[in-house]
Image: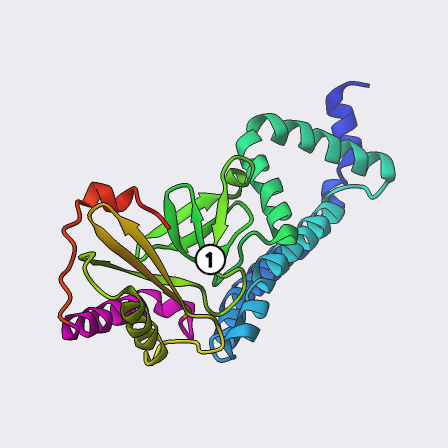
Amino acid sequence: MNGSDQFQQILRDLDKINLADILVTVGLAWLAIVLIQWLVPWIAGRLPGRLRFHLLPIVPVARLLILAIALWQVAILLIEPSPQNILAIVGTLAVALGFAFKDYVSSLIAGVVAIYERPYRPGDWVTIGGDYGEVRSVGLRAIQIVTPDDTVVHIPHSRLWTENIANANDGQREHLCVADFYIHPSHDAGQVRQVLRDVALTSPYTQLRRPITVIVREEPWGTHYRLKAYPLDGRDEFQYISDLTVRGKAALEELGLQPANVLPAVTATSPI
């Protein structure tokens, strides 16, 4: 028996294939995916922050389940439902897809791993490679992040195998923000530290349940202060840092302090 005869035995006879059922199955799956991708974010946007982060990860899982169910239903409508036929089709498809879409399949497998390990989820602020932003959606093959410059970046899940993934909030509503200050070394460091702490305490963005820290480091060109605190909502990160910077600078000027003359290259290589 040649390959053509085997293929004909696996498929149903044409008069037994119901094209209407296949079209209905594909249509219902598409409608269900569109509905879930619209409804879940709509509901999440009206929930408190913590509940929002628990609800949004349902979208990629539900989409994967719908696609799997739809493909299974279509396969049943096309194939004579015997164990031998199903195994033959699955084996053939696996080999063909493995060679033709090796990188794509790698991203799909990494996507399934990401769903369970959850290194990122919608609403998280992540750094992958040189890209930083908020995860807008998690697809089967890739995630979409929105950078601070409002640029959408598509990152395949396969980078999970090779890249370090830094997650700033890991499902929490808020994440740590840092404002930097550079001051001439001739000053009272204790007083400056308390003033900067008060700046964070009085900011309308500050989450007071989280710690506020002021780190001090002496450099050859002056004193480097890092004010570390958490906003009420991580999406306010840059407004929060700007608020801390503007009000912190004004408070330091009231003390009559002089800024340090810092070369950009020196600042960039002096992490705390």
* In the depicted structure, whether residue 57 falls above or below residue 251: above
The stretch in magenta equals: 231-255
Image height of 136 relative to 195, above or below = above
Report the side of 231 relative to 73 (left or right): left
Looking at the image, which residue is at 63% across and 47% down? 112
Give the side of residue 93 with respect to residue 33, left or right: right
Label 1 sits on residue: 168
Q: Amino acid at mark 1?
A: Ala
Residue 201: in sight, yes or no? Answer: yes
Residue 66 found in image quarter: bottom right
On screen, residue 93 above or below 113 = above
Indicate how the structure is coloured in the image.
rainbow
- Report whether residue 149 is seen: no
Where is residue 102? Give x, y as percent: 57, 30
Q: Main secondary structure of the magenta part?
A: helix
Q: Report x, y in % for residue 46.
A: 48, 80
Above or below, 8 against 135 in this view is above
Q: Which residue corresponds to the image point at 34% horizontal and 72% vertical from the top-left? A: 197
Quadrant (top left/top right/bottom left/bottom right) for the N terminus: top right
| Residue at image location 48% in from the left, 57% down from the top | 137
